[in-house]
Image: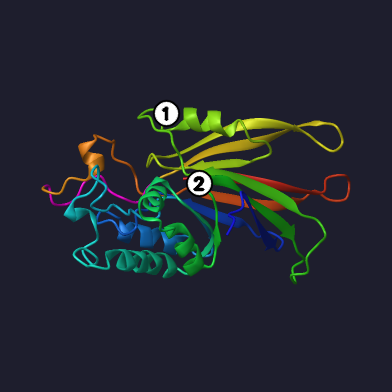
Amino acid sequence: MTIPRVTTVDVYLKPGEELRITPLSDLHIESANFELGAFDRLMKEREGHRVLLLGDVMDLVVPTDLKRWRSSVQDSSIAGRDDWFNAALDLAVERLAKSGAQYDLVIPGNHEDEYIKRHGTDVTSMIARELRCSRGGYSGIICYVLRPTSASGEPFKHSVKLPILYHHGAWGGRVMKGFGGARDWARAFDNWAIFCYGHNHQATVHREVGFRVTPKGRLEEFPRYFVCTGSWVENFSDDGKNTHYAERAGHMPTPRCAPLIRAKLINGGGNGGGWRLEYTVEI
């Protein structure tokens, strides 16, 4: 199966309705240090949102991973099982599915990519099948096509695109939190509104402006957001004898939170205004 670099999602919005998207990365969801309570609370608060899973959904730290492995890394419900991988996958899907969220995309992170390299198992595609969502590449674009409808749900012929560029992430830095490398990488791509990346377990939103030429030959300013999507695993266990690899490496503690993308269509009327898109990102 070929994995597309661009995923398109049609969304129909009634007057005044808002599209809300929660991008998540670095869940490490079957890890002993996964913040299950905080994650469940967030997903309840974000009920009705569309969700993007941008890599390292699973931890997949196994004995052959000499850098990270120790017996305490796995959730207690799967530790010691011969079929620990099957149990870990079931646990991941159970924790994701119980929220009832609409998952639009799941991609691999470095943990899934390392697992497929060592063990020939594409965990990301398994999760995508279970959640009935698209499977993306390590990087790519998900383009939401927003289509306005009448109050009764009848679609108009107009549509507006919200292109979200994504990469699991490859950039760190205690102060910049990956922004410098992310900005350099994103420069190769045109026509995106929001760039989401993870990997470094930080959570930040940085807004800049871009310019484009309108069909009428005018220069138009638009917002661009660089979004570092956070993490859901703690560096420190309650039991001091269990040392997480992030604690050992001296990584700075990170908050368990997720950005929120809001988008809506505005009807500018018949005097040349037309439909326009307004969008923001917050944490």
Q: Nearer the viewer, residue 156 or 166?
A: 166
Question: How far is the residue under mark 1 from the one under mark 2?
Answer: 22 Å
Side of 202 where 158 appears, left or right: right
Residue 27, image x and y in percent?
37, 53
The residue type indicated by label 1 comes to Met
Which numbered marker is on residue 138? 2
SS for callout 1: loop
Q: In percent of the image, x 58 and y 51: which residue is there?
A: 262
Tell which circle, 1 or 2, labels the residue nearer the N-terminal end: 2
Query: In the image, is residue 132 above or below residue 120?
Result: below
Residue 1, image x and y in percent?
57, 59
For the record, the magenta segment spans: 231-240
Which numbered marker is on residue 176? 1
The residue type indicated by label 2 comes to Tyr
Query: Magenta segment: does it hold 29?
Result: no
SS for callout 2: loop
Side of 24 where 252 appears, left or right: left
Query: In the image, is residue 15 above or below residue 257?
Result: below
